[in-house]
Amino acid sequence: MDKVVNKDTRKPENEELERLRFEMRDLTANIVRQVHRRMELSKKIGEIKTNLKMDVKDERVEQEIKSMVLELSDEIGMSKEFATQLIDILLTESKKLQQRHNSETHDLPANSEQKKQTHLSIFLKAKQLELSGKKIIHMEVGEPDFAAPGNIKETLVDSFNTGRYHYTEPAGVMKLRQAIANKLKRGITEDMVTVTVGGRFAVFATIVSLVKRGEEIISIEPAWPAYRDCADFIGAKTCVLRTSIEDAWVPDLDRLEEMITPNTKMIVINYPNNPTGKVLEKRMMQKLVSIAKDNSLYILSDEVYSDYVFGEFDSILDYDYDKSIMISSFSKSYAMTGFRVGYAVANRAILSKIVKVQATALTSVAEPMQYAALAACSSDPSDNVKVMKKRLDFITSRLNKMPVDFVSPDGAMYVFPRLRQQSLADDTVEKLLEMGVAVAPGGGFGDSYDNFIRISACQPQSILEKGLDIIGSVISVE
Amino acid sequence: MDKVVNKDTRKPENEELERLRFEMRDLTANIVRQVHRRMELSKKIGEIKTNLKMDVKDERVEQEIKSMVLELSDEIGMSKEFATQLIDILLTESKKLQQRHNSETHDLPANSEQKKQTHLSIFLKAKQLELSGKKIIHMEVGEPDFAAPGNIKETLVDSFNTGRYHYTEPAGVMKLRQAIANKLKRGITEDMVTVTVGGRFAVFATIVSLVKRGEEIISIEPAWPAYRDCADFIGAKTCVLRTSIEDAWVPDLDRLEEMITPNTKMIVINYPNNPTGKVLEKRMMQKLVSIAKDNSLYILSDEVYSDYVFGEFDSILDYDYDKSIMISSFSKSYAMTGFRVGYAVANRAILSKIVKVQATALTSVAEPMQYAALAACSSDPSDNVKVMKKRLDFITSRLNKMPVDFVSPDGAMYVFPRLRQQSLADDTVEKLLEMGVAVAPGGGFGDSYDNFIRISACQPQSILEKGLDIIGSVISVE
């Protein structure tokens, strides 16, 4: 029977298919034409904005259109994820066209935000200067000058002798995952830990696996630029909650709550903070987690400086929030930046997505480096912490005599002073580099911090002293 | 004067702006509604396809729609890149809806292609079995069993003693880049070389930086699954040129030329090939490069096995093609898989994009591993190559007595036989694993190779012999 029915209907169904496909082509062409009309309209709006000297970007209008589209998609039963993508590519293309018009009119380089100095660009410049024979005091990069734990040397030899230089599981060598879990306590088990190529790859894999194009993350600035870079990489948007030196770098969590849109997927926090050294009070952490819970947002908590804390500190792991990802690394605590071993801690479902990105991008972390990290786990970095605290005290005591404002750090390895004079810190940074001191320009940590510099305490005090003498002489006479 | 004009027109321009924005909202809502209609239509087509038991994917129809959209965009002056993205998200969503309908109707797990075994999944299973005490002969993974060059041990100690464990330039330590350039000759200079986390990260960074969502790469299968995985990662499409054992794995380049569409961006080649060991003749390479030139396509040439060649071999570097990217690594030639050091060679413009991805994702490659690779450069891997050739000869001589077909490899470290019996090789692979031999299932290298297995020659001959005894006994009685 079935067979007969099939046979009978096949012909008309095939005709129906052809008819529908024809309609489909028509409809698709129509959509493209309408999208084109939208782009033409967008250009016109761009022209008017240019004439009115208005910024091409308009957050309010953009959010309105996004909300309208999401409401409409809800009403007609279109998937939210798809609607988000659709409106994102329309808005992105509109902005591109308006910017192009704007730059053509004003004879600017197309599509360029002004190229900013960052701690990395200064580091590279400093390296170049060193190659040409110049002596540079490195107060720009977050690399502790301490020696890595001594037992690592033996471990490296041992890795070689025993042939431990093969592919490992993408999530990392089991013994290292266990050692990290043991160190973290709080009931963390090895299946909630993945070893990554530095904390940076943990950040990268977390953002690209959990946030999609057109979706949003909230970043609290000043911040390490990596969060924004990783969001940019997949075409996600970074919404910035600015904090200020006047508020002692305390974020306004009411404002954060207002920033949440249906497109928001993740809040990124980094305490102790790079560059300010701020640690969030327990009360604030509680509120932040509760906001994330209410809105079902991921929290990516970058805790690479958590060993360098001089008072109280709550890890996100203390909150048992199932949409949280804690990231840390061996780079800072154990002075092992160049070993490139970090890790992420999250529930199994999230972790498997992070591991999949790592397997796709690079198979696994170098095995000798994983065993080096395992060896480090049995050493105690607390002496490093004491030394760092002493150096930061020294730096702040010297800065107290200069025309700068700053908040004394609660942790991490930096002081983030604001220069009182009006000139841009970028020039100061260049001048300092000429004088033989590299510091990180504040503008690299967010748009509102051009008058700040980040001073890193990763040098012996005697060298810091020389660097601070030069800094003092440059910023006092400017 | 200017000022006056501006003042006079500001008010009406603002009104004009409001009017245009209103129109924009209307138009946007209209687009969303039409896109929704398109999705409804797509569902209907999916239903009919399900009733007709047709595959949801239809390459021909998809290409027709894409071409129509690209032509139309050209006609109306819409950017090709944008049109590609737009049609891609429409088609992707359509397929998703059709697949969902299909799986709901047939009670299949949603959105699932059947989960395939790959050499990696078998490797992980084998590792699990070993943890439970079982002995496994590893003929599945491409990891040479040779010792890494002996001078590396000293280098590792030296790296530790001299504190060479810091961040490096994202492109890698200059001395290593120079050593690689010297090894490659052909006028390659260090500024055309970047060191990466294994060859795999070079592949990843190359594909994600040069190919965009909705664009296409052409991959010649059977192939290492990484190319497709990396394309999937950014939402690019992998178009497959299948090769067959009947044609001795020679690709049909006329067919390749036909496959090129306005969306095609890159051809990926891998010779000596993993898994077949095929090397392309000079005449074929010339034709392939000329096709790429004519169509302005990138060629990603994965040459990680180029030291394991038993006859003639042309590198893509011999063709001086400015849109080529040559990728290689220390993993295979020097038996250094777990050090995770690879590299990409390309012109400066391409290279800077690759380096930017690496800087974003992971800062730089572990410095001790870079110095280990530098040490390896001064050693000679030619003994490894001789041994590998001898082992492959041994394997093929044994396979000659089994019910399999294969082409003797021109290079690399594998033989890729087809089992003559009809049963799927996946079952055979499982059975072999139970019997203590891990081999890679052919299905992991492309859809048309389920009856193949990849046998890796990365074990001493005595162990290979035991493995082949088991393989012979299993496939002969089946």
Image (cartoon, coloured by chain):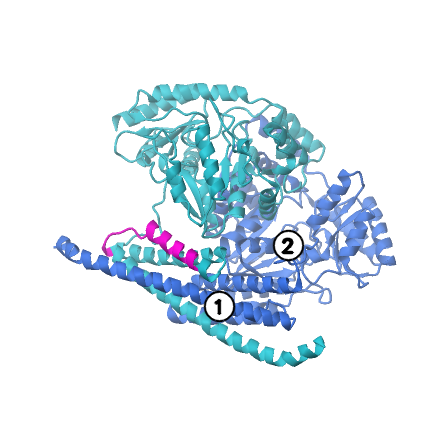
Chain colours: A blue, B cyan
Q: Chain of mark 2?
A: A
Residue B182: quarter of image: top right
| Dot 1: element | helix
- The residue under label 2 is A225
Q: Residues within 10 Å of mark 1 (few under 14, many from 20)?
A: many
Viewer-nearest residue: B27 or A198? B27
| Dot 2: element | loop
* Range of residues picked out in magenta: B51-72
Can residue A302 be seen in this snapshot? no
- Circle 2 or circle 1, nearest the eye: 1
Pointers 2 and 1 in contact (C-beta within 8 Å): no
Sequence-wise first label, 2 or 1:
1
- The residue under label 1 is A38
Residue B187: quarter of image: top right
Viewer-nearest residue: A351 or B256? B256
Q: Position of residue B413 (x, y in %)?
A: 45, 27
3D distance between C-alphas at marks 2 and 1: 34 Å
Q: Chain of mark 1?
A: A
| Residues at discs 2 and 1 both on one chain | yes
Q: Is residue A261 above or below residue B123?
A: below
Residue at (55% x, 66% y) in the render: A291
Q: Position of residue B307 (x, y in %)?
A: 52, 26
Residue at (32% x, 23% y) in the render: B472
